[in-house]
Image: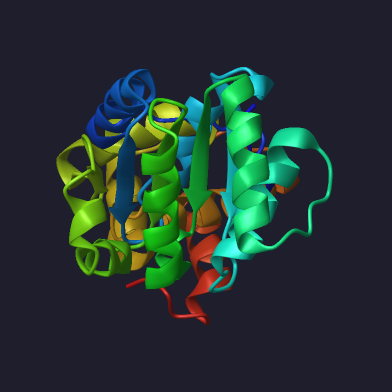
Amino acid sequence: MIEHYLGLEDARVVQTPRFLLAMENMRGVILRRAITVLWGDPGHGKTIAGRATFEGLSPEERCWIKLTTRANPRVITNTILHMLTGVEHDETRWASARTLGRELARRPVTIFVDEAQNLSIESIEFLRWLHEEHPGRFALILIGGSQLHGRLARSPQLTRRVFQPTRFKPLDPRHLDGYLRTFHPIYKDAEAQLITYVDQRHCDCNFGFWARFTASAYDLCRERGLKTLSGEVADIAIGRHDEWGLAA
């Protein structure tokens, strides 16, 4: 089950055009056991789309790793092995590659690498080599910020192998109202002008900012016994986040 920001209750996955495109592209990538990229600025739905595809696969067919640091090939391969087998691995780069090869020979899998903008060029080249070394054995889905595109461009050998990539962009403001009414019940009967006000004051067509705002607004609505976002609640929720200054 997909986990929303801070475990936000009653939230639903909004099927924006980019989300649907990414899902369709990933289906083709998994079928072909290819390499693809989901990239764009934070808060536009890359990880949610990746998790939706991940959740649709059986546990034996999938592996999800998240790069919080500039991990080297040895760490990456051992982490993949841990995710696939449930057993901690601490092998050298080439020993872990051989072990992973034996594991991939048992069944094909899809490997998701989240925060892939943290990949070093060495790790990018290693993943490319690993994919070429085991043709048809695993699909590789790289998910990362806008800088991922530039980082991968430094590896022409990998770039020419990228199949059906998806770039995530800000929400279309013309359809924002409809997206939010699908996203969470507090927007179902909210005034359209209020949604526009919150977006212009705080969220800037960024679903990550909207998820953060909604978590605060929903708590405030429940405290006041409200089922629908009000102007007062909106102002208080915005005020609780404005000090950080991440949104307009």
The residue shown at (37%, 71%) is 121
Please state which of residues 240 and 36 is positioned toward the viewer in this rendering.
36
| Residue 89 appears left or right of 33 | right
| Residue 64 appears left or right of 200 | right
Q: Is residue 136 above or below residue 243?
A: above
The residue shown at (24%, 29%) is 21
| Residue 42 appears left or right of 75 | left
x then y, percent, for residue 122:
42, 70
* Any part of residue 2 in sight: no
x then y, percent, for residue 219:
68, 49
Q: Is residue 126 above or below residue 57?
A: below
Please state which of residues 69 and 219 is positioned toward the viewer in this rendering.
69
The residue shown at (34%, 28%) is 26
* Any part of residue 86 in sight: yes
x then y, percent, for residue 248:
32, 73
* Quadrant in which the N terminus appears: top right
x then y, percent, for residue 159:
20, 53
Q: Is residue 29 above or below residue 87?
A: above
| Residue 241 appears left or right of 7 | left
